[in-house]
Image: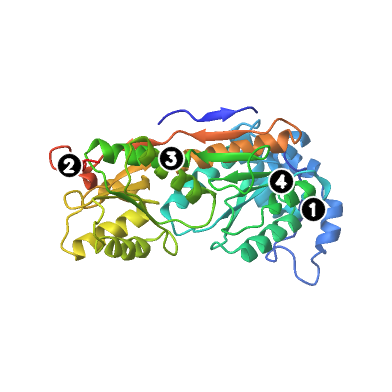
């Protein structure tokens, strides 16, 4: 995997509350949590664990400065004494909550599963956790989640904007003072922070590969009304122009799912002339297209070449294995999370765009130069 292209570029105080286990103190004699909290100090925990008060504070703040053995000893003491870390109270006193909101539009898509795993891996290293929401491409659902995250005082937001989101949303978040990293999709170009890939280049690479196999009637299927689809379509058309190909067929459909790919390929293959190759918005659309071809008695890679985008794990395991443009969702998630943490630490710093270069993964769904459909251009 290639390195990303980057354009230039504390945790909350801890507090604890205690509650005596019911097995040790009769309910009639048990002190209230308020009185217990006021009588127990960090020094009491430190004395029990035989460490300093500052060490207890660092452990409660999940600081990486504490050795594993010491951390476990303090945690054992806290557990033995029955104390509970009151993160809400800590947030009231501290400037940060060590939490991020994450909004995606289709959590069932394996692309986003991989991306969120990358986000969580990067956040875990810094003692952060994430709150995940699935907008289902609904701006209303997205807005409710963002407002709830504001109430919980998250330190920042990783946002893959829902289709038809108000472009002013990014400015609203800036007015709230909530750091926001746009991931994959974007509502506004820099100066706002962004992490993703070059989707125009993705489509260009797909078309270039198909042209190298001799294809001249190349269609594009799938997509919606948002920045990622627009960039792909621009790349598709730019590549056709570059190769001097006049045939172009762009069919959007209602979403980017297997069902959409299945429906669109059946429509396309009934046209005359029909395409000899299709570029699919993502791998899910490509899987549906290959299924549709086989239901029509056609073989992917022989009767029609199919190429996807994202290179999800299933692509390599398909029948036939799917040629795809890898966009590295796990790495994008990691980069987005790290960018968010940099922005939280330095709110006034120069804005950044982190772009993961796409890579072509060649498999059998496009056939090979030996069995590609080679057409002789008609004379003018």
Quadrant into which the C terminus falls:
top left
| Disc sitting over residue 348 in the figure | none
Is disc 4 in contact with disc 1, using a CB cutoff of under 8 Å? no
Above/below status of 136 relative to 241: below
Q: How far apart are marks 1 and 3 (CA)?
A: 39 Å
Q: Distance between the residues labelled 3 and 4?
A: 26 Å
**Sequence-earlier tag: 2 or 3:** 3
Q: Which of labels 2 and 3 is toward the front?
A: 2
Q: How far apart are marks 2 and 3 (CA)?
A: 32 Å
Q: Which residue bears the numbered disc 3?
A: 328
Quadrant into which the N terminus falls:
top left
Q: Give the left or right position of residue 38, taking residue 52 as reference.
A: right
**Label 4 neighbourhood size at 10 Å, few (<14), some (14-19), many (20+)?**
many
**Sequence-earlier tag: 4 or 1:** 1
Residue at screen point 83% across, 47% down? 93
Front residue of 360/251: it is: 251
Q: Distance between the residues labelled 4 and 1?
A: 16 Å
Q: Which residue bears the numbered disc 1?
A: 89
Q: Which residue bears the numbered disc 2?
A: 374
Q: Give the left or right position of residue 317, taking residue 74 as reference.
A: left
**Label 3 neighbourhood size at 10 Å, few (<14), some (14-19), many (20+)?**
many
Q: Distance between the residues labelled 4 and 2?
A: 55 Å
Q: Which of labels 3 and 4 is toward the front?
A: 3
Q: Which of labels 2 and 1 is toward the front?
A: 2
**Sequence-earlier tag: 1 or 3:** 1
- Which quarter of the picture shows residue 297? bottom left
- Which quarter of the picture shows residue 46? top right
Q: Distance between the residues labelled 2 and 1?
A: 69 Å
Q: Which of labels 4 and 1 is toward the front?
A: 4
Find residue 280 and report its horizontal and vertical position in percent.
36, 51
């Amino acid at each position: 995997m290639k390195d990303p292209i980057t354009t230039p570029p504390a945790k909350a105080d801890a507090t604890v509350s205690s509650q005596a286990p019911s097995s040790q103190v009769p309910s009639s004699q048990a002190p209230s949590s308020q009185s217990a909290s006021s009588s127990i100090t960090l020094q009491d925990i430190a004395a029990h664990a035989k460490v300093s008060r500052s060490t207890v504070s660092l452990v409660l703040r999940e600081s990486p400065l504490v050795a594993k053995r010491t951390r476990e000893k303090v945690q054992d003491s806290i557990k033995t004494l029955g104390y509970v870390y009151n993160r809400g109270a800590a947030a009231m006193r501290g400037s940060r909550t060590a939490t991020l909101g994450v909004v995606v539009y289709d959590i069932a898509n394996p692309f986003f599963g991989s991306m969120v795993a990358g986000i969580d891996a990067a956040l875990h290293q810094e003692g952060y956790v994430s709150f995940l929401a699935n907008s289902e491409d609904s701006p209303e659902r997205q807005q409710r989640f963002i407002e709830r995250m504001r109430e919980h005082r998250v330190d920042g937001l990783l946002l893959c904007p829902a289709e038809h989101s108000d472009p002013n949303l990014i400015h609203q978040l800036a007015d709230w003072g909530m750091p926001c990293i746009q991931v994959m999709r974007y509502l506004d170009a820099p100066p706002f922070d962004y992490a993703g890939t070059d989707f125009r280049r993705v489509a260009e690479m797909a078309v270039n590969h198909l042209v190298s196999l001799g294809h001249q009637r190349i269609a594009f299927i799938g997509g919606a009304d948002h920045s990622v689809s627009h960039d792909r379509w621009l790349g598709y058309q730019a590549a056709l122009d570059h190769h001097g190909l006049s045939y172009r067929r762009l069919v959007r459909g209602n979403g980017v799912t297997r069902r959409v790919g299945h429906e669109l390929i059946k429509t396309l293959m009934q046209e005359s002339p029909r395409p000899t190759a299709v570029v699919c918005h993502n791998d899910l659309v490509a899987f549906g297209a290959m299924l549709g071809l086989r239901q029509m008695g056609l073989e992917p890679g022989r009767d029609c070449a199919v190429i996807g985008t994202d290179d999800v794990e299933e692509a390599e395991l398909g029948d036939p294995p799917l040629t795809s443009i890898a966009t590295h969702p796990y790495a994008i998630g990691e980069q987005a999370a790290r960018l968010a943490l940099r922005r939280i630490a330095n709110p006034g710093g120069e804005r950044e765009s982190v772009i993961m270069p796409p890579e072509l993964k060649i498999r059998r769904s496009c056939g090979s130069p030996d069995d590609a459909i080679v057409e002789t251009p008609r004379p003018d």
